Amino acid sequence: MLLNALQSLRTKPFGFFTVLLLLKSYLAYVAIFGTELSLAPLLTEIPFIWLIFCLIEWFASKRKLLYYFLTNLLVTAIFFAAIMYYQYYGVIVDYHALEQVNQVTAVKNSVFSLIKPYYLLIFTDIVVLAVFYLRGRKKLDWRLPSSGRERRGYMTALFVVSVVMCFVNIFPNRASMNELKKAEDMGILNYEAYTIFSKKTQDWTPLADITQEKIDGIKQIQPLQSLEYQGAAKGKNLIIIQMESFQNFLVGLELDGQQVTPNISRLMKENFYFPNFYQQVGQGNTSDAEFIVNTSLYIPQRGAATGVYAGKELPSLPKLMKSQGYNTATFHTNVVEFWNRGELYKAIGFDHYYDAKYFGEEDTVFFGASDEVLYRKTLDQLKEMDQQPEPFYAQIISMTAHHPYSIPEEKYKMKLPERFEGTFVGDYIRAQNYADYALGEFIAGLKERGIWDNSIIVIYGDHLGLPIYSLERKDKELMEEIYGREYSYTDMINIPLAVIGADFTHPTVFPQIGGQVDVLPTIANLMGIDLAGQIHFGQDIINQTYNVLPQRYYLPSGSFVSEKSLFMPGSGYEDGTQYPLAGDGGHHSGGATEKEYNQALELLHLSNSYAGQLPDRVREPQ
């Protein structure tokens, strides 16, 4: 059988590789779109592939078989990259993601953990052909033209038909808002080509037309006579703790009588807790969360904020705090070059940063010192800062509970129920239990050093930890056990926010929705700082109850969270899907309105326009 296949490869490479790539396209469609066997890949992927094959037949007088093999390798790599990217981000990869390829080596454990064994079947033929060639057995002579060269007239007709089919697939679907739907309707290969050649000119709103009044009007912010808790933390130290991959369902979670996050759950219960709080990050993940929280701007349409906006003079929370006489610093155990953080920290104006150089290689987990080392060494610096006459703002980025959550056994602080052992969800819960333990040690350290009473502490999750598209059947069953219903997209992007202070004597749960863009204005109200003159796209979620939260990247473009639902568009609003915020994960026809859909799109456009037209930052000489 293998010999017959090799003979077909030698004499009829056009048909051989067509069948091969059709099978691979079906694998990609099942993995990404969840579609059953249909004609879709045949009608969308094969015309694009035939375009390339026709060119080979026309112009390759020698080494034709080699060009077929290289085409097979390239298309296979595209399909595999699309599958893997979807497994983590839930969106279709495009050429812009290549700008971040240098980040992959740092998170290779996360990448490998997403590979399901059957995905590797896509490379089977390449391995087999390579082995036969390299071992010299049944060796294929790549230099000779394959026999049975198809007639040029036939190839010309097929080329024309393929071009027409590609245009038919691409052009009617260009306006689709949802990238997943666009890629499914166009075909993955057509979509990738479209993103390369469809260069869009920037249609920015003039900077002079972007005012806070205009932004507040779109967001329907109500002017209030007085603000609750205004200035309640004025003059206090500000400590922001960003928890790696921390989702809201962990708060108060018990497994067989064991509290998973006792320290965070107690802090949420005893202070200000926002359970309906949502991530707004994109390709930059943790670094995007740092950007949004510190600027109250949305992430860019493509790429990480640290790469796109780090060269700008950004209005920011550190600059705001410095204007009030604060010292500022940020703490992260990774190298500062990762995600271009060094430039970000200059752009948003931190006085100091402490990265891997400060924390060292003691007790490393994944790509940095453990959370215990992070908090212990940070406490040393905070003690010194607290002894200065000026108050301080410190941002602390935890990292040990990072995907794929395979922390060392010596870090285990709980015994998982047997049904959770060896599962992705179980590993996640155990990693977050350790993160909670380390945070508890830090809180105790703040109290011992006398910093606690004179500080306000803000804790939130940076982004989701359990993508729906990465979960196996067993993991989905465990999540259904935890929630008492199907795990949904709204649950996936739901992260907690807590505002903690010794003076907040009335524990309060705020039911209104909020997002990471709202942290800066909420803090400004508590610190008694006037935001007049500083453009911001968030709002004080202690005092404002209506909100619209645009989403990017982990969900299709045009997605947003409203008071009633998470909305995900199809081609536009009309064929979109509503996911209830507190429902059973199903869909319904009510919820977010078309007006809110347009509000979300306008807010994203204004943020792009504003950040993109800010003056370039003056670079310090090297």
Image (tube, grey):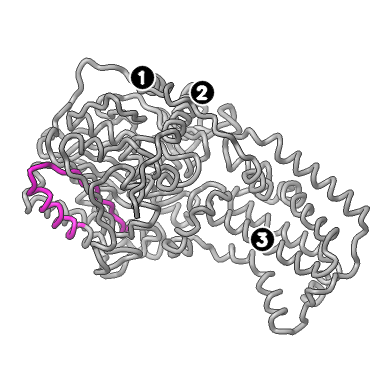
Left or right side of 423 for 452: left
Q: Nearer the viewer, residue 187 or 405?
A: 187
Q: Which residue in the protein does label 3 denote? A: 74
Residue positioned 23% across, 47% down in the render: 351
Give the residue number, with chain letter if any, for mark 1.
213
Q: Amino acid at mark 2?
A: Glu
Q: Is residue 66 among what the camera can see?
A: yes
Lower position in the chain sequence, tag 1 or tag 2: 1
Residue at image point 50% right, 57% down = 101
Which x, y percent locates residue 166?
A: 75, 44
Residue at image point 27% right, 38% down: 317
Element marked by disc 3: helix
User: Can you identify the residue that label 2 sits on?
Assistant: 594
Q: Nearer the viewer, residue 184 or 396?
A: 396
Residue 309 horizontal side relative to residue 452, left or right: right
Q: Residues within 10 Å of mark 2 (few under 14, many from 20)?
A: few
x and y, in percent, of residue 525 in the image: 21, 29
Badge 1 local density, few (<14 within 10 Å), some, or many (20+)?
A: few
Spatial CA distance of label 3 from label 2 is 41 Å
Q: Nearer the viewer, residue 583 or 121?
A: 121
Marks 3 and 1 sit apart, C-alpha to C-alpha, by 50 Å
**Badge nearest the viewer, 1 or 2:** 1
